[in-house]
Image (cartoon, rainbow, N blue to C red):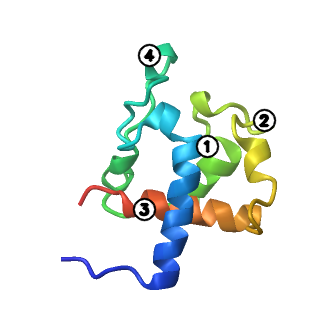
Amino acid sequence: MLAAPAPALSQSIESGKSDYLRLCALCHGLESTGLGPLREAMKIAPANLTLITRRHGGKFPADYVKRVITEGGGIRGHGSSAMLAWGPVFNAEQDGASPDARIEELTRYIESIQQR
């Protein structure tokens, strides 16, 4: 059994979850399995985000996930690197959190939902 995250880490994950629910769940779904309500309208099905670690040989690729968030990662559904679907949101402070902190928190949340 995994130990409970440290309080600061737990708070960071919760902040990342909040951004995920606002910005990602419409496509990737509440369970992060790619079954969001907008999936039917998309030409390319959203990825199951709970399988990222499995798809990368058992190691969570945090730097890759951050690149996908900030640059699109070459994923067509995420838009170009010049104008991501959520780019303006992550380029502004929110509730005193810097863009880098918010990207880190979202990455930690995605890491926390990986299937074991």
Q: CA distance from mark 2 to mark 4?
A: 23 Å
Residue linked to disc 4:
40
Precedes in sequence: disc 2 or disc 1 = 1
Quarter of the figure with the C terminus? bottom left
Circle 2 or circle 1, nearest the eye: 2
Camera sees residue 92 = yes
Circle 1 or circle 4, nearest the eye: 4
Camera sees residue 61 = no
Q: CA distance from mark 1 to mark 4?
A: 22 Å
Circle 3 or circle 1, nearest the eye: 3
Q: Name the residue rendered at 72%, 37% in the picture.
A: 84
Q: CA distance from mark 4 to mark 3?
A: 26 Å
Q: Name the residue rendered at 51%, 33% in the picture.
A: 26
> Disc 2 residue type?
Met
Q: Is residue 74 left or right of residue 88?
A: left
Residue linked to disc 3:
111
Q: CA distance from mark 3 to mark 1?
A: 17 Å
- For numbered disc 2, what is the local secondary structure? loop
